[in-house]
Image (cartoon, coloured by chain):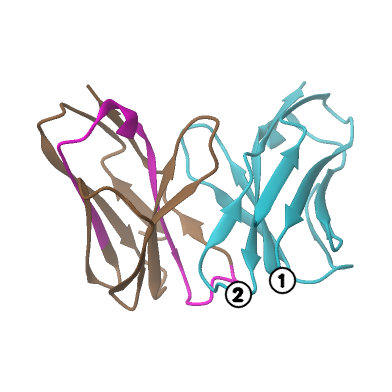
Amino acid sequence: EDQVTQSPEALRLQEGESSSLNCSYTVSGLRGLFWYRQDPGKGPEFLFTLYSAGEEKEKERLKATLTKKESFLHITAPKPEDSATYLCAVQDAGNNRKLIWGLGTSLAVNP
Amino acid sequence: ETGVTQTPRHLVMGMTNKKSLKCEQHLGHNAMYWYKQSAKKPLELMFVYSLEERVENNSVPSRFSPECPNSSHLFLHLHTLQPEDSALYLCASSQTGGGYGYTFGSGTRLTVV
């Protein structure tokens, strides 16, 4: 069964304290893995798509990496404005539309 | 306006009411989606419209009725809802294939009393 597991469930960091969020997945064939950021009271905001193991993408203080079993979202020197819930979703190669979503990691960055 | 716009932002309705949620996208995308987001649950796909045709209905109760009059507009008609239907309802759009990421609206926070 297709499954996405994110860890930790919640993470509290001090400003400038780098860390990583994990997204483990089980699908028969990976079409794409997506990272989103969601602020309270808003819809998810698209961050990255990763398609194959070894791929990396960066945006400001965020860097996403992908292996055959998991993806990491590395946050370097975070700022309070990086506080949000980070969602991971995978798309099975056998289904062009349906995304399988994780529960998210709630990140709080203290000044 | 740009992006995906949802109205209303908040809605409180009784179990016997009928209401509609509206979604509009200005991105030229050809697929639109309704999602339900509840606490402690992953995002649940409800309906998918591709090129204005409903291509997926994920066993959603008939008290939820979608409508897609054109590629830019999507509605979710609600009637005889239950308290457990209280949630954040999100609209999203994408280009067919979905590999480019979905663009979400800000959602409608629905409370059924």
Instruction: Tell me what hue chain B is rendered in.
Output: brown
Q: Residues within 10 Å of mark 2 (few under 14, many from 20)?
A: few
Q: Give yes or no for contact between labels 2 and 1 (Cβ–Cβ under 8 Å).
A: yes
Query: Vertical placement of A3 versus B68: above or below?
Result: above
* Coordinates of residue B88 in the picture (x, y in percent): 39, 37
Quarter assignment of residue B14: top left
Looking at the rendering, in which quadrant would you find the N terminus of chain B? Answer: bottom left
Is residue B30 at all visible to an observer of this figure?
Answer: yes
Residue at (71, 44) in percent of width and height: A5
Q: Which mark is residue B89?
A: none
**Mark closer to the chain start, 2 or 1:** 1
Q: Amino acid at mark 2?
A: Gly
Q: Amino acid at mark 1?
A: Gly
Q: Which residue bears the numbered disc 1?
A: A29
| Inter-mark Cα distance, 2 to 1 | 7 Å
Residue at (69, 60) in percent of width and height: A48
Question: What element does badge 1 sit on?
Answer: loop
**Viewer-proximal residue, B69 or A3?**
A3
Whether B108 is among the magenta residues is no
Q: Which residue bears the numbered disc 2?
A: A94
Instruction: Tell me what hue chain A is rendered in.
Output: cyan
Question: What element does badge 2 sit on?
Answer: loop
Task: Specify the subunit that label 2 lies on.
Answer: A
Residue at (89, 36) in percent of width and height: A18
Quarter assignment of residue A81: top right
**Viewer-proximal residue, A59 or B92?**
B92
Magenta segment = B74-100
Task: Specify the subunit that label 1 lies on.
Answer: A
* Coordinates of residue A68 in the picture (x, y in percent): 85, 63
